[in-house]
Amino acid sequence: MTAMDTNDMLTATQLVIEEALQKLGYGQDMIDLLKEPMRLLTVRIPIRMDDGTTRVFIGYRSQHNDAVGPTKGGVRFHPDVNEIEVKALSIWMSIKCGIANLPYGGGKGGIICDPRKMSFRELERLSRGYVRAISQIVGPTKDIPAPDVMTNSQIMAWMMDEYSRIREFDSPGFITGKPLVLGGSLGRESATARGVAIMIDEALRKKGIPLSNARVVIQGFGNAGSYLAQFMYEAGAKVIGISDVNAALYNENGLDIEDLMDRRDSFGTVTNLFKDTISNEELLSLDCDILVPAAIENQITADNADNIRAKIIVEAANGPTTLEATRIVTDRGILLVPDVLASAGGVIVSYFEWVQNNQGYYWSEAEVDMKLREMMVRGFNQVYELHQSRKVNMRLAAYMVGVRKMAEAVRFRGWV
Ligand code: GLU
């Protein structure tokens, strides 16, 4: 991704926030406050590598706004992480938390690194170093990190352990997405995909298409993409295309998802095991009922939006469709379920995990699933109704629902 793309991402988010706040009747003071994060910390983390050399990594933590409650959001490990991206992602987290009506504002963190090229111990030292570097501004009642792109429950475990050592008390509520034995929640690992599957159910109902035999294309085979493929397969839908960072697989009769799940590596790479592949660009333009971008930002743009042949787009990744492309696909009658709504399952179950940590009382998976469905369906209905009643696209409707509570909290606190 180029610097230009990331700049656009933040600018686009700011445009939508501004429009949403205006439509809700707020003035320039509220827009000035909420269009940027209230706090951004940049840290340099020196790490001893396995070969004895020291490398200095750069990390960030962005906190959008804490009027509603502590900030919340993942930490990504990726070579393209940068300040502007982290800022935009933290704003999106606020909107997600707002739509789901969680008692949080948005946060996001990241480290510029390539975990695929680091050893297990190097990753441990980096995870711990990051927590030491940001420890002053995070905590169970301040800002609660979680997994994101290329981070997982093991990394959360190291981070939680480091934080507990610094504070000298057991702090499971400091971070979510932990392994079960350290206070993780049942259902957290597959939560984003579970939430996307619930959104697919709702969107299909609006379009009058039955799920059995619906043709699904999923871009990305990481945490969200692979679990979603499995859920769709189990529900009797036909997953006709999937992709990873290298290429895509296509079979009009449906791919063997169980086999692909067995053979994927921990970063979701699987297409390298096949000769007969298509490109990611070809994947996006396949004729299908549901297209799920579940990889990274800026995949559906003004350049390819006209080629999309799906009836429904459900965004499991953060920011996969640009604003211009949102307009094009909406005008073409494609129902778009935007990222800030569709991918909220992860942070919703993170919230459940934090609640369970605070209570010291743990729920069954059925309870987690039931409460997740309730929250996602309520969010979908609110966004869809606003989209219809105010005649705004689904993304703007989602922002209006998502920012409303935060703006009200800011008002009550007397900040603006
Ligand atoms: N990183 C995930 C997201 O973008 C989850 C955040 C969380 O669980 O706090 O929504």
Image: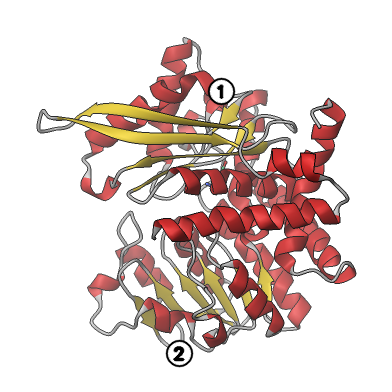
Q: Is mark 2 within 8 Å of ligand 1?
A: no
Q: Secondary structure at mark 2?
A: loop
36 relative to 157, above or below: below
**How crowded is the residue under tag 2: few (<14 C-alpha within 10 Å), some, or many (20+)?**
few
Q: Mark 1 = which residue?
A: 139
Q: Quadrant of the C terminus?
A: top right
Q: Is residue 277 above or below residue 415?
A: below
Instruction: From the viewer's side, name the closer residue of 289 and 12.
Output: 12
Residue sticking out furthest to the left: 51
Q: Residues within 10 Å of mark 1 (few under 14, many from 20)?
A: some
Q: Quadrant of residue 37?
A: top right
Q: Residue at x 46, y 9 (%)?
A: 168
Q: Position of residue 174 (x, y in %)?
A: 54, 26
215 sits to left or right of 32:
left
Residue closest to the eye, 1 or 228: 1
* Ligand 1 quadrant assignment: top right
x, y percentage for residue 195? 63, 58
Residue type at numbered disc 2: Glu
- Judging depth in this view, the residue of 235 and 251 nearest the camera is 251
Q: Does mark 1's beta carbon lie closer than 8 Å to ligand 1?
A: no
